[in-house]
Amino acid sequence: MSGAVVLHSGGPTPVINASLLGVVEEARRHAGITALHGARHGIGGVLREDFVDLFSIDPKTLDSVARAPSSALGTSRDEVREEDLERIFSVLAKRAVRYLFYTGGNGSMSAASRIERHAKDRGYELRVVGIPKTIDNDLAGTDHTPGYATAARFFACAVRDIGADNRSLPGQVEFIEVLGRNAGWLVAATALARHDPDDAPHLIYFPEARLTLEQLLDDVDRVYQRLGRCVAAVCEGQLDENGQPFGADVRSGSGGTLAMNVAHRLAILVMEKLKLRARSEKPGLLARSGAAYPCELDWNEARLCGEAAVRAAIEGASGVMIGLVREAGALYAVRTTLVPLEEAARQKLYPPEWRNAAGNDVRPEFVEYAAPLVGAIPGYAAL
Amino acid sequence: MSGAVVLHSGGPTPVINASLLGVVEEARRHAGITALHGARHGIGGVLREDFVDLFSIDPKTLDSVARAPSSALGTSRDEVREEDLERIFSVLAKRAVRYLFYTGGNGSMSAASRIERHAKDRGYELRVVGIPKTIDNDLAGTDHTPGYATAARFFACAVRDIGADNRSLPGQVEFIEVLGRNAGWLVAATALARHDPDDAPHLIYFPEARLTLEQLLDDVDRVYQRLGRCVAAVCEGQLDENGQPFGADVRSGSGGTLAMNVAHRLAILVMEKLKLRARSEKPGLLARSGAAYPCELDWNEARLCGEAAVRAAIEGASGVMIGLVREAGALYAVRTTLVPLEEAARQKLYPPEWRNAAGNDVRPEFVEYAAPLVGAIPGYAAL
């Protein structure tokens, strides 16, 4: 008689439900897990004892849920507070929970690690295994994170489509605001939209480096003079030379900055300073849904991570997150590994050596890295 | 020996290339049309004599092009200037052009009408037939316009996806900025995302009516108090009670207002006045591409309009645009009709009687109108 809890924490991803499927399917294979409790809306679901009995869900429903974007369990940004630990362990003990599967990003892995240490301290037998989940691709110890490839595919397709519009109706500068506060992995992926050198995106900026207004205007002007059009991809978290959001018309709430509009502000700056037509698009959370451009590889890997988490826990692992290791060789293949939770909690930024010297494009090493994950982005026929 | 010219004018749509395919295929069937010149980038292509010989394009390429979003010929916002008419007719005469197929929206139909009148005045034999094209659905004399259904489908799917995100991670207000400066047809279509009464969108605002800040805050607060979340769809052209864009951080260029950010400003107002988490998404021109969520019916009807334009011209019509008439009966069916260009040039706004009394939702009549065009929007499985 031992139970397991699985929960989702932080922003949802397009494939977090595939990881859930992996957990349920693998848990069903092990007699040692007699109940699988899905906590609704993260750690709060544990505190409220708001659980879904996942073994009672029929396989057909589960398969449909696994294909749906967003978190079917519900997720939350709730922190694990020191004063809640007592209550958490009382709920776990009541259900004889010996396995905790914590699905999330950096902050979640840090929270999972705290719970694991606390269990050890109080002598409560609990195996805590993290399941990686973030579109931002910024977890240390793994080649990439489930969720990244779908969101990356979304933004690459979005830039291809905005680029086709910009080419057919030129005379305009387009800014596309890409998700990512600190890490440039997603904005870099827009490079995969290109089939010809003159294809969008013409400029890519990385939040790891500050961007001067002077460089931005020089870059845009140069592209526009050459092509009569320009598409630039910027991260929502891009800062100017003073370390401030461009234009500063942003607002923060609990849990971080919410109202971003860097692309809009850059469009206005280009209109005012360069006297060019400009506008901006901000698909935002549509990329986190990913329904527009599904990515089968990402879905499969997310499911794999869910399965691997259960197997690792059954085999005795704890205090680790499932990581993905890319096998050597020309053909893309991955296997899973175990990453200490505290390592996974560290943010992995986009490597500076994968930016070009001008700081406005990726280098080929990134395309080699990302193309197998994201898959081919089909181009459009032209007359 | 008589030639034909086809051109695209105004913003591209997801299916404008399907109309082009229809023109080419039908023109090939008529011995009376010996050459078909595709003008690159609208009327400017005529002035520059920059033409694509469309009869020389192999059918396979043409089929691929017809499936691509944006305008494969290229389009433009160039006006037909009085002083250019002489040059236009000299170019047409040089190629013995007797047919002009003008693909566009209100402004384009007005321009086509001027060219047609000028031809009559100077005794130049020319049949001018308009092909409707606008995602805004605001042309008079037609049940709907090719391009609308795909863009409507995009926004309905986008609201479904943002709604799923908002449900899985509640505690937040989401504004989605929908294309449309003056006409509410697209923002209305987000209503098609709903499967249950509590599904997004919870609020829909129409640019035909001004929106007071007081109503907006009351509406959002009421939804949020009930559900703990809120998704509101607003048009980029939504004005406040004083007839001003909310927050006024917008800029105009040649050809209209470019840098819009109404959803961002509304998110900030909600954060400041209601002390709620809020953010905004603005997929913008992605909807005009429509590649994310294709709509086969729209594509077929766009092609049909291209074919019908050629047939009408061959049969002697001129000074008309192809319109779509919905047949009576339970099953959706359309036929084409001829609409005087000057009628088509008039803007058809969203009917006030299809807004609810509170001015924050559609009425069922709209859903009956739009659902057959947009098709079913599949929902997501839940636990």
Image (cartoon, coloured by chain):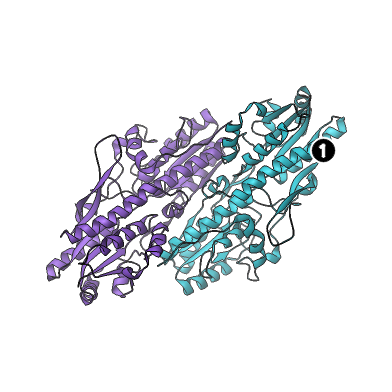
Chain colours: A purple, B cyan
Residue B5 in the image: x percent, y percent?
72, 31
What residue do we see at 79% from left, 24% from top?
B1
The amino acid beneath tag 1 is Glu
In the picture, residue B7 is in which quadrant?
Answer: top right
Question: Is residue B378 or residue B257 the one in the foreground?
Answer: B378
Residue B313 visible (yes or no): yes
Residue B100 in the image: x percent, y percent?
75, 34
Is the residue B170 above or below the residue A273 in the image? below
Q: What crowding class fits label 1: few (fewer than 14 Cα within 10 Å), some (14-19), or many (20 or more)?
A: few
Residue A240 visible (yes or no): no
Side (left or right) of B89 relative to B154: right
Question: Is residue B71 or residue B297 the one in the foreground?
Answer: B297
In the picture, residue B166 is in which quadrant?
Answer: bottom left
Residue A6 in the image: x percent, y percent?
28, 65
Mark 1 residue element: loop
> Which residue is denoted by mark 1 in the rendering?
B315
Is the residue A290 above or below the residue A76 in the image? above
Question: Is residue B24 or residue A63 the one in the foreground?
Answer: A63
- The quarter of the picture where the N terminus of chain A appears is bottom left
What residue do we see at 57% from left, 61% from top?
B192
In the picture, residue B12 is in which quadrant?
Answer: top right
Side (left or right) of A6 relative to A360: left
